[in-house]
Every structure is written in C-alpha cells, then in structure tokens.
Image (cartoon, rainbow, N blue to C red):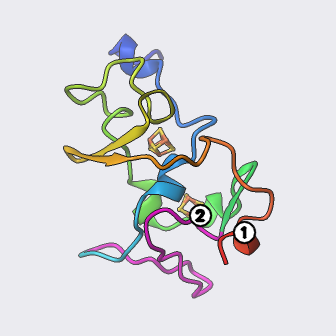
Amino acid sequence: MSHPNRALSQRSCKGCSACCYELEIKSRIGYSTLLDTGEDIAKPQGVWCRFATPKGCSVYEQRPALCRDFACDWILGRKGFGINDSPSQLGLIGVRGERVECTDNPLPNLPKTPEKESA
Ligand code: SF4
Ligand code: SF4
C-alpha cells in the first residue's frame, strides 16, 4: 500500500545516519540508552555512536526504543522541511521544532572505524 501522503512516502533514512552523529543521545523519561546486552549508547553531540558503521546501525534489530522511535522533522514532513530539505541537503536536523546545525563532517560518510576515530 502506498503512503497516503506522497511527499512523505518519498522520504527515507536510507543513506543518512546524521542523527547517529550529530545529536546528543541521553536517557529521558520512558527511554533508556541501554541495549539488552547492557551496553550504553549514550554519547555527546558530534560524535559517532559506537554502533554506527558504514553499512548502518550494527545493532539495528536490538537498537533501543530511543532510536526506533526517533524521527527527525524532515522524515515527519514538519513545517519548513520540504522534500528537498533532508538533513544532508539542508545541513541541519530538525528535532521537534529545534534545529541542530550539522557539523562539517561530510554526511553521510561514516569513518571506517568510528569507535577508534572518535576516541
Ligand atoms: S537524521 Fe532524519 S533522515 Fe537522517 S537517519 Fe536520522 S531520522 Fe533518518
Ligand atoms: S544504536 Fe544504532 S540507530 Fe541508535 S544511535 Fe547508535 S547507530 Fe544510530
């Protein structure tokens, strides 16, 4: 079945991992930063999540609800985020009405070994 909103149906996270780099990840009410294994994905802004890889999230099936439930304002088609205003095109991520400027880090090019490079 096609998405009832054609503009939204054309939006996808495919090829973008901007939020896994640009945004601070911290626990909040109802959302833990812990995986089932006990490993913590909490991190500051502007640092790769240690589970991010060039192929995407290495714990995709086990990723916490914090990640599963996140959708930036472009994905949601919020006001001000037209079809051509994706994070990589606009250079910023909309997060519940707030705008987080992307750094110079070339999106969506992940470092080959994000854990080591962010250390
Ligand atoms: S920044 Fe938006 S488009 Fe990019 S991966 Fe995150 S939710 Fe998807
Ligand atoms: S756990 Fe996966 S989806 Fe969540 S921030 Fe890390 S790389 Fe991104």
Q: What residue is drawn where x is 49% and y is 62%?
A: 46
Label 2 CB sits under 8 Å from any ligand 2 atom? yes
Q: What residue is drawn where x is 67% and y is 78%?
A: 119
Q: Is residue 90 left or right of residue 54?
A: left
Magenta stretch, residue numbers:
30-50
Residue under numbered circle 2: 48
Q: Position of residue 14 (x, y in %)?
A: 60, 34
- Marks 2 and 1: in contact by CB < 8 Å? yes
Q: Nearer the viewer, mark 1 or mark 2?
A: 1
**Main secondary structure type of the part rendered in magenta:** loop
- Disc 2 crowd, CA 10 A, few/some/many (<14, 14-19, 20+): many
Q: What residue is drawn where x is 80% and y is 57%?
A: 112
Residue at far top of view: 6
- Mark number, residue 117: 1
Q: Is residue 118 left or right of residue 80?
A: right
Cα separation, mark 1 vs mark 2, equals: 9 Å
Q: Tell me the kind of residue under disc 2.
A: Trp
Task: Name the one closer to the observer, 113 or 14.
Answer: 113
**Does the segment drawn in magenta span residue 33?**
yes
Q: Tell me the kind of residue under disc 1.
A: Glu
In this picture, is 119 found above or below 103?
A: below
First of labels 1, 2 by sequence position: 2
